[in-house]
Image (tube, rainbow, N blue to C red):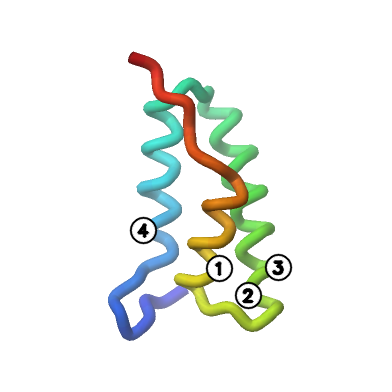
Amino acid sequence: MEPTQTGFSLNEEISNWQNIMLNGALTPDDVTELTQHLNDEIIELQSKGLNDEESWLVARHRIGSPVMIN
């Protein structure tokens, strides 16, 4: 998927999100599964007319944030 006029890159955002999730309390397998759910959600939102950036923001919110280990 190509960046929009704002310079948004869905692929970069997903990659950054995965790295953040891996630094939390999740295993690589957990991140792989969550990434699939995230992608499915993005596709669903795009089918309803949202652009890449809008789909990303909504899907990321729905998936949630990682639990950080200190």
Q: Which residue is mark 2?
A: 46
In this figure, which residue is indicated by the disc labeled 1?
55
Q: Are marks 1 and 2 in contact (CB under 8 Å)?
A: yes
- How many angstroms separate mark 4 from mark 3 (CA)? 19 Å
Quarter where residue 70 is shown? top left
**Disc with the residue nearer the chain's start (1 vs 4):** 4
Task: Give the mark nearer the N terminus: 4 vs 3.
Answer: 4
Q: Could you tell me if the residues under marks 2 and 3 are in contact, i.e. CB atoms within 8 Å?
A: yes
| Distance between mark 1 and mark 2 Cα atoms | 6 Å
For this orientation, the residue located farthest to the top is 70
- The residue under label 3 is 44
Q: Earlier in the sequence, mark 3 or mark 1?
A: 3
Q: Is residue 68 left or right of residue 36?
A: left
Instruction: Please provide percent x and percent y for residue 66.
Output: 48, 32
Mark 2 lies on a secondary structure that is: helix
Mark found first going from the N terminus, 2 or 4: 4
Which amino acid, mark 4?
Answer: Glu
Residues under numbered marks 2 and 4 in contact, where contact means CB atoms less than 8 Å apart:
no
Residue topped by disc 4: 12
